[in-house]
Image (cartoon, helix red, strand yellow):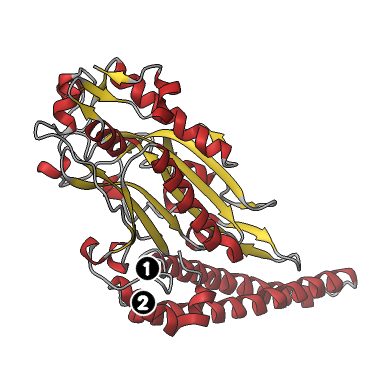
Amino acid sequence: MLHINKIKQNKEAYISLLKSRNFDATELFDLVLSLDKDRRSTQQDTDKLLAKGNQLAIQIGEFYKSGESKKAISLKEESLLIKEKSKRLQLKQSELEKEIENILVQIPNVPHSSVPSGNSDIDNIIIQDVKILPKLSSEAKPHWDLTSKYGLIDFELGNKITGAGFPVYVNKGARLQRALVTYFLDKNISAGYSEFLPPHLVNKESGFGTGNLPDKEGQMYHVHDDDLYLIPTAEVPVTNFFRDSIVENLPIKCTAYTPCFRREAGSYGKDVRGLNRLHQFDKVEIVQIQHPEKSYKTLDEMVSHVANILDELELPYRIIQLCGGDLSFTSALTFDFEVYSAGQKKWLEVSSVSNFESFQANRLKLRYKDNQGKNKLCHTLNGSALALPRVYAALIENNQISNGIKIPKVLQPYTGFDLIK
């Protein structure tokens, strides 16, 4: 959520930058600043009344002490009127604050100045690309055929017990999944991230803190009786560890493995076949809480970290900078990673690494103290390191040979085997 003081200071610049994501904030900014002016005026009137009421209370006490009861009673009547008026003003102020927040939560994060304008993913910019793609035999198969042939994943069983988009991993298929999770966590821990195992359900305050609510309410599974939400990513609970906090010793680096749950309403067709899009999937997340002056250097480091993992997995990938129209609601700058799926002959997104600047921190009230001891908003960043389904799909498709599926060397200590046959 944008901070209203930042809007006052940077109104025209923010309007211009938000246009790169096809969002015209002019009217909303004018409205929220007008309401804030009214709120501040109401606050001043309230403060004056409260100060006057305090003075009257002192005078009333002095009159009672001196035996001037009539004067005290007269002032008490005036004091009651002041209290009633101040209550009305406080109610008005509360209503104005609520109206301001209702407007602010509609406004997406301001894109970084480097974000290109654009309407959708076709306007994204490839900033690093692989030159040589893997070539497979004419008999090469997509992953849904491979998982069936080698007994790795049972999509029909998942459909039977839950529904489409909930696969069951079997035998070596399950071991490969577990190996990827452990490998990702080990890589993150070796890079200085602390491992957490958070809850898989969160309350509404947590969803709001990271910007998932109300923006993506329709995409999240909701447990109505308890008013809890299944997490769409570990970013939500992990970032909320620091809600309503003043933190020290930045940066704070966290990693977590969790299942993720997304309704993906309206998803259908060949692009969601097999592991391409699931309602439940596993992901290892990295989250950093950082000083504002260092967050963009940190973003570069996180991008390099994800690239290193994909290099070790020997997966061909490209890095894409998202245009304004393809940015998430909360992001100021995002880089996506896509791996090449040789069996499908297409690119699959496996990671998004983003800097949210202070957008989430303002919602979370996540702060640090500057050199003068003043509370300032932190910057938050997160990335997938990595999301498993499409990594899994590309890995088995790209490594298929005539008598099985080769396991990359880096994973063999985790799987305990070097070939699925």
* Label drawn at residue 352: none
Q: Nearer the viewer, residue 248 or 57?
A: 248
- Residue 274 x %, y %: 17, 33
Residue 34 lies, with reference to residue 62, above or below; the image says: below
Task: Report the side of 407 relative to 43 (left or right).
Answer: left
Taking the image as shown, residue 120 lies to the left or right of residue 418, namely left
CA gap between label 2 and label 1 equals 8 Å
Q: How many marks?
A: 2
Counting residues from the start of the chain, the first of labels 2 and 1 encountered is 2
Q: Which residue is mark 1?
A: 107
Q: Which residue is mark 2?
A: 28
Marks 2,1: beta carbons within 8 A? yes
Against 165, residue 292 (above or below) is below
- Looking at the rendered image, the disc whose residue lies closer to the viewer, 2 or 1, is 1
Secondary structure of residue under mark 2: helix
User: Residue, x 13% and y 32% (percent of image)?
Assistant: 140
Q: Position of residue 400 (x, y in %)?
A: 22, 29
Q: Residue at x 42, y 74 (%)?
A: 113
Name which quarter of the figure residue 63 lies in. Answer: bottom right
Query: Which three-letter amino acid code belongs to the residue tagged 1?
Result: Ile
Which of these two is toward me, 81 or 220?
Answer: 220
Q: Is residue 335 above or below residue 61?
A: above
